[in-house]
Image (cartoon, rainbow, N blue to C red):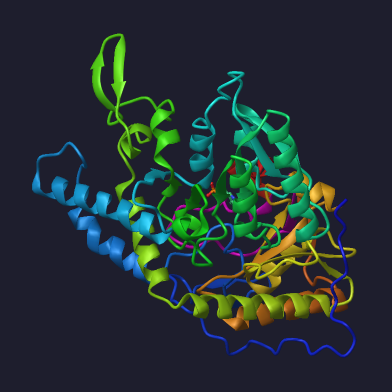
Amino acid sequence: MTTVTDHRPAAGAVPPARVDDLAPVLPVVGADTLVPLVDGREAPYANLDVAASAPALEAVAAHVARVLPLYASVHRGAGYLSQVSTALYEQSRATIGAFVGARADDVVVVTRNTTDALNLLAGAVPADPLTGRPGRVLVLDIEHHANLLPWQRSADATVLAGRGSIAATLDALRAELTDAAAAQAPYALVALTGASNVTGEALPVADVVAAAHAAGARVALDGAQLVPHRAFSLAHSGVDYVALSGHKAYAPYGAGALVGRRDWLDAAPAYLAGGGAVRRVRVYETTWLDGPARHEAGSPNVIGAVALAAAARALRGVDPEALRTHESALRARLVAGLEAIDRVRVVRVWDDAVDPVGVVTFTVAGYDPGLVAAYLSAEHGIGVRDGRFCAHPLLGRLGFDAGAVRASVGVGTPGSDVERLIAAVRALVADGPQAQYDVVDGLWAVVDDPRPVPAGLGLDGLLATAAPTTDAFGCATY
Ligand SMILES: Cc1ncc(COP(=O)(O)O)c(C=O)c1O
């Protein structure tokens, strides 16, 4: 049974210093954007929802602007710009591969996002050669739905409940893999997160790879929360597949990737059936291509791939230790600052996690998480996420079925944003919210929210904060 332990610092421990002066590592677009507050003032937007979607790096936006005039049809166009665009697309593929340390023979499939990448991989796990049944896949219950549901649907999936410590969870994982192999029902794949989108924690990849490979299983890493924040290499880690999303890696232009071993991908049915994935088509017979094209039917997202590659170059241009130090300082301060507030509880999966990425999930006793998030936005201009973060099994097991609040940071986060969040939560606990809130269509919203929508975009009446009209936005269903 996993327990949620209280990690408040021991008496006498020195809490991390304030981080007011900690500057971003890389500039992001929109860092100075002002947002309206419910009292009529404006505040610079504190984007602490980077784990959901990160703002574009300035370098990415600049590169996209430079490339857009060169954009034309790819692959089949004979025109000069078509050839330039094709070269840009294929060059981006190589850059994305290098970003995750792809081996020489690995395939880089450009996808829409991590969800898309893992669904593609789920269709490529080979059937058990003895039984003909779908290949067995082992996952933990801490996963994002993107790394649970594809296996649940198309593979023979087993979900292992995490234990209270990393060490105990690894023991359980090893035992499951060994027992399955001994019972002649070996796993084909272990699919696990590189960093939890709820807590930033992860199992040590090297131990998982060693255990899986010893039992004849491959390893797929959900890299959505890992690769934007830590240097990662397929070749060095021995991981077989990694999935990632551009919009979490400061390249919000609609592309992601699946990178990994060629054999399964070449043997799998084409992920999408259509143009570009085929060598030869007769009316009733098709010969499919191998390699990435096999799974990329239809016109590819050239600009998405170019943007993702630009983000990869920008991130790799920074000393990985600088990234880690920046993010660790922000996270440590967030945790310490929040835990120092009465009634605040920080969520953890494990007692002994090492080097979590910049994601901190918490609750404030007496306040619904949705109300806390609405308050942070309306009264402080701070953007966070509330709910169960597409990780319902984990939140349920840890006792947070009613949801929680998540703050997340990245390369563009200044320390002052973290200090604003801590101060705002402290003020909530001390004085309560100053505005009036109500639940409208299942969402917390300011009563008679006076905040204007940005002018000139035709958004009147469509914003989620405009409580009386949320139906128009379909917010009730999110
Ligand atoms: C750990 C993790 N995996 C997968 C996903 C899914 O990513 P996407 O929505 O880009 O497919 C997310 C998104 O939040 C995530 O945090």
In front here: 100 or 187?
187
Residue 396: percent from left, percent from top: 82, 47
Q: Nearer the viewer, residue 87 or 103?
A: 103
What is the chief secondary structure element of the magenta stretch?
loop
Question: How many numbered marks appear?
Answer: 0
Above or below: residue 103 compared with residue 28: above
Where is residue 116 drawn, in percent x and y? 49, 40
Tell me: 345 left or right of 473: right
In the rendering, at what x and y percent does residue 314 appear?
A: 38, 70
Residue at x-position 38% and y-position 46%: 106
Is residue 381 among the parts visible in the rendering?
yes
271 w.r.t. 177: above or below: above
Q: Quadrant of the C terminus?
A: top right
Give the residues in magenta: 440-467
Q: Is residue 428 magenta?
A: no
Residue 300 lies left or right of residue 408; in this view the side is left
153 sits left or right of 395 in the view: left
The residue that appears at 77% across and 74% down in the rendered structure is 425
Residue 446 shown in magenta: yes
Quadrant housing residue 50: bottom right
